[in-house]
Image (tube, grey):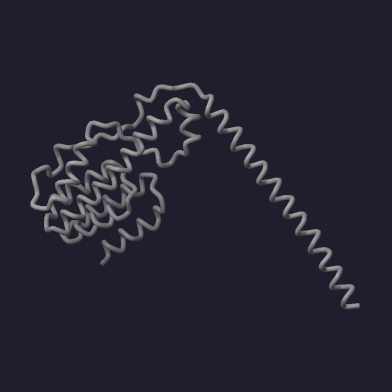
Amino acid sequence: MNLIISLGLLFVFVIWLQYQLRKNDSSSKKAKYNYWKRESQANTTRKSDISMLDYIHLPIDRLPLEDNADPTVNSYRDTILSHSNKKILNLSSFSNTELKLKYGASNINLLSEYDNNYLIIISILHKWGERLYTNGYPEDALAVLETAIECKTDVHKTYCLLAKIYLQQDRPDKIDNLLDIISSIPIRDKENLLRQIQTIKDS
């Protein structure tokens, strides 16, 4: 009797498993179909004007541009200067398909270039500010890190280091302002970053 029940349960399980596999296969095929349909539409989208997008402009005059004893600091400065006249866009929230649908397939190479410029400047601004702070130049570090914030960086370490410097300078109002900025911009893992900044403020 137990054998019959076991075989019956096994049969039910096999039927259920086959159903799940067919359902998953159907969902996967549908997802692939929808993706390629959208991609095909994106590749035929006509070019649109991108001259009025929200380009990022580096406030070079606010940055510490003097030669430093540390050649690494100077190399970071030079990289930022070399990008100061380039077009910069933060497009991290868009996929390539979405960009083509929105602005046309023929603009995708330019948009990718402008987005790559953004990734370079926010990375280098953080490294530059961090190096200045480590070398004992907190005010210069502030200028660089605040520039990164103005560029709406999504580098969590930039916000945390800035909050740390504000704390050391006994400027809690500046940390509050930092919290407001983070709350108002699209940034990955926002809640975790807000908690980190609040922890720094309360320490």
Q: Residue at x 17, y 41 (%)?
A: 78
User: Residue 49's quadrant in the figure?
Assistant: top left
User: Residue 77's quadrant in the figure?
Assistant: top left
Q: Quadrant of the C terminus?
A: bottom left
Nearer-the-camera pick, 47 or 201: 47
Q: Residue at x 25, y 55 (%)?
A: 175
In the rendered structure, the answer to whether residue 46 lies left or right of residue 125 reads: right
Direction bottom: furthest residue: 2
Nearer-the-camera pick, 185 or 24: 24
**Above or below, comparing residue 168 to residue 51 in the picture:** below
Q: Position of residue 176 (x, y in %)?
A: 27, 53
**Above or below, comparing residue 113 to residue 119 in the picture:** above
**Above or below, comparing residue 50 to residue 10 in the picture:** above
Q: Position of residue 198 (x, y in %)?
A: 31, 60
Q: Residue at x 24, y 57 (%)?
A: 161
Q: Position of residue 6 (x, y in %)?
A: 84, 73
Q: Residue at x 91, y 77 (%)?
A: 1
Q: Position of residue 70 (x, y in %)?
A: 12, 53
**Above or below, comparing residue 71 to residue 103 in the picture:** below
In the rendered structure, the answer to whether residue 24 lies left or right of residue 75 reads: right
